[in-house]
Amino acid sequence: MIRQYELIDKVLSYNPKANVALLNKAYVYSMKAHGNQKRASGEPYLTHPLAVADILADLKLDDASIAVGLLHDTLEDTLSTFEEIEELFGRDVAELTDGVTKLSMIKFDSKKQEQAENFRKLLMAMSKDIRVLLIKLGDRLHNIRTLHHVPKVEKRVAKAQETMDIFVPLADRIGLYTVKTELEDSCFKVINPTAYEKLEEKMNTMREEMGTVEKMTKIIQEDLNKAGLNVQVVGREKTIFSIHRKMQRKHLKFEQLTDIIAYRVITNNKQKCYEVLGHLHDKYKAIPGRFKDYISSPKPNGYQSLHTSVIGPTGDRVEIQIRTQEMHDIAENGVAAHWLYKMQSNPEEAEKQLGENIQYKWLKRLIDSLQDTKDPEEFLENAKLDLFSENTFVFTPKGDLVSLKKGATPLDFAYSIHSEIGNQCQTAKVNGRVVPLRTQLQNGDQVSIVTNKAQHPSPAWRNFVVTGRAKSAINRYLHLQQLDEQIRLGKEILEKIILKDDYPTVTEKDLTKVLKEVGAKEVQDVYLALAQGRLFPRQVLDLLFPHKKKERAEQSKQEKEEAAAKKVNSKSSAVAIDGLTDGISIHIAKCCSPLPGEEIVGIVNTGRGVTIHAKNCDTLEKYMDEPERWLNVSWSGEQPVNQAFEVRFRITIQHQPGALSALTTCVFNQGGNITDLQMEQRGLDSNVMLCAIEVKDVSHFKRLSTALGQTEAIVGFERLKG
Ligand code: MN
């Protein structure tokens, strides 16, 4: 166990200006507070906070963090109070200590709830000050190192599992790889001892065959020294857990792994890294395709190193990483090292960054996204999911780091910033270039979004966003939007008929009277049903104005009689076509929907009458070999008065308020009847609608087409066939 003065010396070695008095005071206070409490090992309790402070000093943390390492269990396990610690050690230390302290005043319903609520508190505290997490990890690391003293196996496994679930991913997120690696390896040994022992055996055999890491390190070291390169060579073995994970993930056997041992060459400047590389490639055969220069293009988390693989002195494949001391520290200890180097070069900036936690916005966002989760178990599950899911790290134009699910697109990025930015996302630039919104982002991309108030989410967006946040925001918007549009359309449909057939004005209050009869709960539902064609305006109007219904029935009877009198051919059919036997049933082909006035042919279907196609319909090719089925037909000069033929259009309208209404108005003005209207595609400045319109005949269709062409809000349209 480290002694008090050794701890102080260690801190002074990297921070000569350390506040020794503060550290000594914290040591004495902690010793008195814990009194004769004991650890599971039987040792005095003080050994634990002292060991935690030692771990934090290894990470070269600041005075306050080391002091809190000593004090971290006083609030939780002794009679100390926040006020007392604040008075003795200042606000900073008191708040940090409180941040690492579990909730104690609340009664929990279950162990799970307690775990969740404590985790929530920890997240909050570390989002305010990332040092809370560093201290908590130091605490956890020592607890895992001494886990074998805990007598009950279930307790040991539970603790190890919790560490794997929560603290390992957190350590990984902040780049504290030394701590992460030790934690996961030790926990794996507790959770799955059989697998651990098997791999340990294999490792021992391998060491016997290949020679130990120490031996190899020496060879490479001497080699580089002889070349006049004054560098340090360190060998490292992959931990058992990371071997296990790699075998599982890549479905490899132990023997297939090539990177169990890696060597690191630590230099004192960047230039030397390349010199070392040159020498190694000179001396040993380099394996093609294995060289990577992360010095000139660092990984997004700041990692820098040269990577190469060579056939080493013993004829085995050897992985070598070459980096400066600073790169090495950052690679091993992430945030802690960043902070330390910053502190040396620019203390003011470092303090500021620490306060603002510039790099840890992901933490705030994690908390945001979990805020609404009321059920503690769900909270814990979601948090684990978020921590474990593989991520792509990208940057905002200001250089803030944003972590997104792998496969995320610029749209996911936009939604992660704010749902409004997502909804109004017009174009995206990645590394300065405009890219399609569906582009998959890569680690390190810098993403900027151009918004436009006139832009809205398109249904197609749902097909390529990957984050839950973007998906639910788009769905929410579309759902509301669709309802809105349909309600407006429903209103319009009803109003046109009222105007056309001279009904009195219908108020919403009037409509409430017929809700029950049309099977609606509220007036909005009536409009929706009208827009969706589940309800016809006549049905509503007949209910409201029964006397008009009678009038209309009489009128149409009269019309029918007049029509029948005029008609000579195919009386039984709703459509009048010359050249057919009386009584034969007629279908108008859906593929071409010919209109009266257009040239047509009939195709005889056995048992199903005659299908009428337009003469230029592509479907007719199918019947080329069956001339016996073709009938020469033509439209009769007179069609039933109320006969309507459906024509389907694809109409592109401007993306602006009133465009849809301009379309429907145009159709109504031309006496057409919209029977179906759907949004096919929503675009930047235009929307594509699929629209079915009933017309009387080809000249009616032509009139309507001319009118559509003259409507400003309509960008283009085509008649759909087939
Ligand atoms: Mn502790």
Image: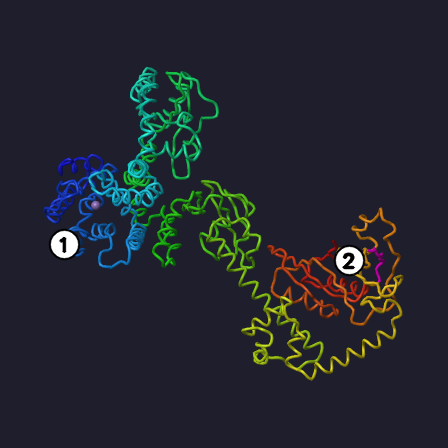
Crowdedness near tag 2: few (<14), some (14–19) or many (≥20) residues, C-alpha within 10 Å = some
Horizontal arrangement in the rendering, residue 624 relative to residue 402 (left or right): right
Residue with the mark numbered 2: 589
Q: List the single residue furthest toward the bottom.
A: 547
Q: Is residue 492 depicted above or below 43 in this figure?
A: below
* Relative image position of residue 633 (x, y in whole percent): 87, 59
Q: Is residue 148 depicted above or below 259 in this figure?
A: below
* Residue 719 in view, yes or no: yes
Q: Nearer the viewer, residue 493 or 708?
A: 493
Please tell me in which quadrant of the rendered image residue 485 appears: bottom right
**How would you classify the magenta stretch by its main secondary structure?**
strand
Residue 15, magenta (yes or no): no
Q: Nearer the viewer, residue 705 or 405?
A: 405
Count of residue discs:
2
Quadrant in the picture for the N terminus: top left
Q: Is residue 244 depicted above or below 139 in this figure?
A: above
